[in-house]
Amino acid sequence: MKSQSIRATVIVLFGLFFGGICSFSAAGKAWAATPVTQQDVTYPNYRFKNGETLKSLRIPSPQVLSSSFDVQHIRIVSDQSFEDVRKNLETDLPKLDVSIFGALSKGDHDRAADYEKNGPALSIFLVREHGLLLQIFGKPGKSVQYEIGNPMTAIKMTHSQLAAALYVPLRVVLYADENGKGVFEYEKPSSLLSKYDDARVLEVAYGLDALIEKALCNAATEKQSKSAITGTEK
């Protein structure tokens, strides 16, 4: 009687084991027969009951648009060394007072008006030492990327065209040519922003054109003394 009970138990376990293998195999074949495209995202469902395959959620592809427009590239070559031009620029233009972001985000109109009237017309938002990265090749280079702009100028443009945030603040590169002289390169703001065909944006961009060119030419020119470009010079 005891041996019959053991034999029955073994048969049941064998049946469950063999049945599980068959179910898994059948589900695996069903899954293999269902191709997954790039647009299919699958749920991890491993229960495999009654030959079910993994469920999939189909997500529509994003719309990708492409357009072309003309951009005016500006190059300013100095007779001064890279080091002198860099020193001039970083002396002329202050580092951004980041507290203005907090004031703007809180809707502080008084602070915004004061910054626009009395603050610098241009500030250095960020400096990236690209040249130092070339040490990986055995010798560092002389190349610095700047982000230069004015928060008030930026929000005037993005208020009309949110996508204009792609171009403000403006990126400017300063590097040393083969003779060690400083060279600035950048894309003219009005040409970058002309793609939006928005008169309100272009009006601000034209003013930015003049400010950027003046600041960089000033830095590229040898002078005994320079004064920072401020909002009073607009």
Image (cartoon, rainbow, N blue to C red):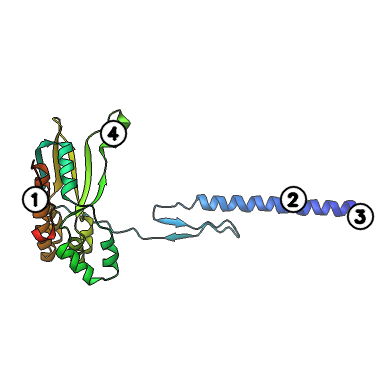
13 with respect to 207 (left or right): right
Query: Residue flagged by tag 4: what amino acid is it?
Result: Leu
Tell me, yes or no, whether the two marked residues, 2 and 1, touch with CB atoms within 8 Å.
Answer: no
Q: Which of marks 3 and 1 is nearer the N terminus?
A: 3
The residue singled out by tag 3 in the image is 1
Image coords of residue 197 (percent x, y): 12, 62
User: Disc 2 versus disc 3: distance between alpha carbons?
Assistant: 20 Å
46 with respect to 103 (left or right): right
Image coords of residue 4 (percent x, y): 87, 53
User: Disc 4 versus disc 1: distance between alpha carbons?
Assistant: 30 Å
Q: Earlier in the sequence, mark 4 or mark 2?
A: 2
User: Disc 4 versus disc 2: distance between alpha carbons?
Assistant: 67 Å
Badge 2: residue crowd in 10 Å (few <14, some 14–19, many ≥20): few
Task: Choose mark 3 or mark 1, whichever is in front.
Answer: 1
Looking at the image, which residue is at 15% across and 38% down?
Answer: 84
The residue singled out by tag 4 in the image is 134
Give the quadrant of residue 78: top left
Query: Residue flagged by tag 1: what amino acid is it?
Result: Lys
Q: Could one spot residue 164 in this view of the protein? A: yes
Give the quadrant of residue 98: bottom left
Looking at the image, which residue is at 36% across and 60% down?
Answer: 60
Element class at badge 2: helix
The residue singled out by tag 1 in the image is 214
Mark number for residue 14? 2
Query: Residue flagged by tag 3: what amino acid is it?
Result: Met
Task: Choose mark 2 or mark 1, whichever is in front.
Answer: 1
